Image (cartoon, rainbow, N blue to C red):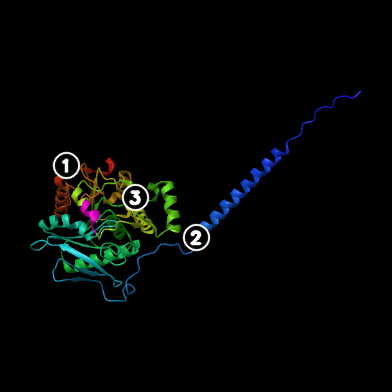
């Protein structure tokens, strides 16, 4: 009698083939990721580097000395830096003899014309205002290429010495807006700082790497190495710099304003901003710090960090005003006349109550309030 056979259960060969296929795909994925990373690394090391603005025709100090060259009018000309590069400058001069001199530095992608409004107002108050197109900006050579923090600082120091010689005996102040403020900070905290009566920082660019967050920081690191020459407009950020809309419209159509910024220039700017932020403990110059509550460019937290890190021994020489109606372009806002009055009053007497504080249109911040 035949007995029924016991069933035998076998693992399907299809199941084992599926496992092998999944393992093979995983191996392929790992190999592809390794290949991709190797390719990216190779690209990063194969000449995709920051393109700095070329220097002038001479090594610093080996050519003609720095000089302010004028044209037919005393209010404009070219400024020859210590490497021979020529930078356009212009001035807003009082009718009579000036009581003080201000050297103003513009922000990123801007140029000297940024100070037309404050220059005119301060000149009416007896203050001579000078500004130049920093190299790589406006009508200066090598437009759109980042010159490096060291070169920007050297140009500022050259110009400061020339103005001190042109106006001997007059108090000389440095005024920096946004990126220009960061250059002023770097110039006055590095060794060999220029001797000036004080500095005015209008919404200075003090937004460093720590404030950026991990993802933007890594993204910038990768982009600088892979696509340094790629440009961006920043239009998708929807940032408004001022409530002065006619001026904002004129800015957007001004051919001397850079509209597309190279990635390596953005990286250079962040390097500069990071240095300026970290330099706060070394900044001992007499300082007037200005900021608008509606600023959409420089975060308040970053400015507060900079302010609180200024050295305690200089606290009596450093003042901060916050304007509730102020934007990033404080010097060009609709309420800019208040800012001009405060600057002129501070230059006349840095210890006196300032007009905007007296009429409650601005708040003066102490270190303990930050």
Q: Residue at x 20, y 48 (%)?
A: 245
Report the residue marked by disc 1: 361
Say if 51 sits above or below 341 in the image.
below
Q: Mark 1 or mark 2, which is nearer to you? A: 2
Residue sitting nearer the eye, 60 or 366: 60
- In the picture, measured across the screen, residue 242 lies left or right of residue 128, that is right
Crowd class of label 3 (few under 14; some 14 to 19; many from 20; radius 10 Å): many
Of helix, strand and loop, which one carries label 3? loop
Q: Which numbered dot is residue 207? A: 3
Could you tell me if residue 286 is visible in this image?
no
**Callout 2: SS:** helix
Which of disc 2 and disc 1 is earlier in sequence?
2
Q: State which region is magenta.
A: 249-254
* First reached walking from the N terminus: tag 3 or tag 2: 2
Q: Position of residue 84 (x, y in %)?
A: 29, 73
Pointer 2: what residue? Answer: 43
Of the 4 image quadrants, the one containing the C terminus is top left
Q: Is residue 268 magenta?
A: no
State yes or no: discs 1 and 2 in contact (Cβ < 8 Å).
no
């Amino acid at each position: 009698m035949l007995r029924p056979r016991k069933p035998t259960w076998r693992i399907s060969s299809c199941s084992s083939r599926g496992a092998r296929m999944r393992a093979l795909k995983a191996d392929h994925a790992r190999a592809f990721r390794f290949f991709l990373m190797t390719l990216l690394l190779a690209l990063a090391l194969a000449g995709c580097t920051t393109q700095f603005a070329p220097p002038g025709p001479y090594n610093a100090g080996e050519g003609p000395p720095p000089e302010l060259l004028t044209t037919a009018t005393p209010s404009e000309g070219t400024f020859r830096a210590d490497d021979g590069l020529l930078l356009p400058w212009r001035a807003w001069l009082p009718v009579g003899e000036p009581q003080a001199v201000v050297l103003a530095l513009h922000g990123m992608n801007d140029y000297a014309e940024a100070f037309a409004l404050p220059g005119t107002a301060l000149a009416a108050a007896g203050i001579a205002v000078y500004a130049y197109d920093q190299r790589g900006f406006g009508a200066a050579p090598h437009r759109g290429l980042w010159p490096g923090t060291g070169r920007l600082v050297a140009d500022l120091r050259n110009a400061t010495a020339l103005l001190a010689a042109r106006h001997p005996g007059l108090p000389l102040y440095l005024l920096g807006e946004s990126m220009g403020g960061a250059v002023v900070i770097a110039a006055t905290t590095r060794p060999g700082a220029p001797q000036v009566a004080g500095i005015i920082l209008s919404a200075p660019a003090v937004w460093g790497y720590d404030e950026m967050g991990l993802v933007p920081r890594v993204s910038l690191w990768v982009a600088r190495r892979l696509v340094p020459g790629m440009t961006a407009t920043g239009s998708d950020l929807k940032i408004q710099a001022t409530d002065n809309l006619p001026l904002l419209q004129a800015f957007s159509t001004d051919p001397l304003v850079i509209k597309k910024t190279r990635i390596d220039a953005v990286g250079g700017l962040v390097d500069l901003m990071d240095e300026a932020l970290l330099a706060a403990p070394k900044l001992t110059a007499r300082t007037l710090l200005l900021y608008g509550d509606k600023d959409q460019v420089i975060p308040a937290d970053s400015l507060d960090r900079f302010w609180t890190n200024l050295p305690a021994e200089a606290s009596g020489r450093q003042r901060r005003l916050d304007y509730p109606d102020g934007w990033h372009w404080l010097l060009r806002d609709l309420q800019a006349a208040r800012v001009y009055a405060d600057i002129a009053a501070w230059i006349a007497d840095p210890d006196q109550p300032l007009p905007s504080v007296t009429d409650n249109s601005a708040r003066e911040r102490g270190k303990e309030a930050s």
